[in-house]
Image (spheres, rainbow, N blue to C red):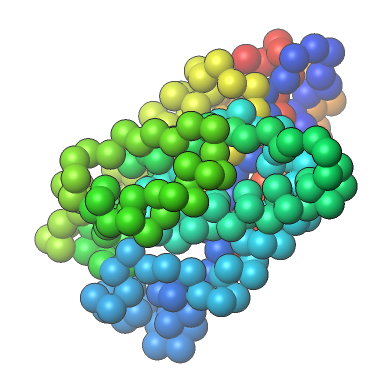
């Protein structure tokens, strides 16, 4: 889905919002319900076979869009990292088929705590250590991206606790801060690979609200018509694209 909030007469900023592919905790939820999220065996859950196929399809079907991205901002949980890696590996393979002699452009990757899932209580939302992340994904990450960096709060997950889970107000504030940070970035094309609770905190709506004063009447009418589609729940590997014209930035 693509939402263009105004006619572009110059440079634009494009932001792709992606929910991770199906993780083991998501598959278990379909069988046992929310108890799956409380189960230690799904700590920092990896993708299922279905999830890996979803990520491959994302990369294949949206290869052109993915390869135009300058910066990928990714939650540091395993399911988002794995989704990002598989999608980009598939996008590179698709690009190689289309133009074997042309090297694919590689974006930069930033692992950022600020866009992770609602923090606390559920083991599936507890981050692996930085060392474990590098052991699982480091070699592939450095092969897939021009630059890999992180803004993790320490070697181990210092944000997650069993005693407290973020409230709706807390994750809303985090999402709002993230939107401001992202929209102030110099990159003209960005992707954020994140989670259902963070997306349901309304980061797409917040991006639009931040620039509402610059909407043309036509774009506002179009936006109103698309509101229900924009705010619907993100399914696994769902991608939605927001494009802002120069006057809105």
Q: Nearer the viewer, residue 229 or 21?
A: 21
Q: Is residue 148 left or right of residue 154?
A: right
Q: Where is residue 231? Give x, y as percent.
A: 62, 50
The residue at the point 78 percent across, 23 percent down is 6
Q: Nearer the viewer, residue 140 or 242?
A: 140
Q: Is residue 217 left or right of residue 68?
A: right
Q: Nearer the viewer, residue 175 or 182?
A: 182
Q: Is 110 rendered above or below residue 46?
A: above
Q: Where is residue 86? Give x, y as percent.
A: 59, 57
The residue at the point 35 percent across, 36 percent down is 150
Q: Where is residue 65? Give x, y as percent.
A: 74, 40
For the image, the number of numbered tags is 0
The residue at the point 33 percent across, 56 percent down is 135
The residue at the point 25 percent across, 51 percent down is 131
Q: Is 84 rendered above or below residue 184?
A: below
Residue at the limit of the structure toward the front, as seen here: 101
């Amino acid at each position: 889905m693509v939402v263009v909030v105004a006619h572009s007469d110059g440079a634009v900023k494009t932001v792709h919002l992606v929910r991770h592919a199906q993780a083991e905790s998501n598959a278990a939820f379909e069988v046992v319900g929310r108890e799956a999220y409380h189960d230690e065996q799904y700590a920092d859950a990896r993708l299922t076979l279905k999830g890996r196929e979803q990520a491959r399809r994302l990369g294949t079907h949206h290869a052109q869009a993915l390869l135009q991205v300058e910066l990928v901002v990714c939650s540091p949980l395993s399911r988002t990292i794995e989704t990002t890696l598989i999608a980009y590996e598939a996008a590179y393979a698709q690009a190689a088929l289309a133009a074997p002699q042309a090297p694919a452009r590689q974006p930069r990757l930033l692992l950022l705590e600020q866009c992770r899932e609602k923090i606390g209580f559920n083991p599936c939302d507890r981050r692996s250590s930085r060392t474990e992340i590098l052991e699982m994904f480091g070699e592939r990450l450095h092969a897939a991206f021009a630059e890999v960096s992180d803004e993790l709060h320490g070697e181990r997950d210092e944000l997650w606790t069993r005693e407290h889970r973020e409230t709706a107000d807390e994750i809303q504030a985090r999402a709002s801060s993230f939107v401001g940070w992202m929209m102030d970035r110099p990159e003209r094309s960005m992707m954020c690979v994140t989670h259902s609770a963070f997306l349901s905190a309304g980061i797409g709506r917040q991006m639009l609200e931040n620039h509402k004063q610059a909407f043309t009447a036509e774009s506002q009418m179009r936006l109103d018509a698309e509101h229900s589609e924009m705010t619907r729940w993100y399914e696994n590997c769902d991608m939605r694209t927001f494009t802002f014209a120069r006057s809105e930035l």
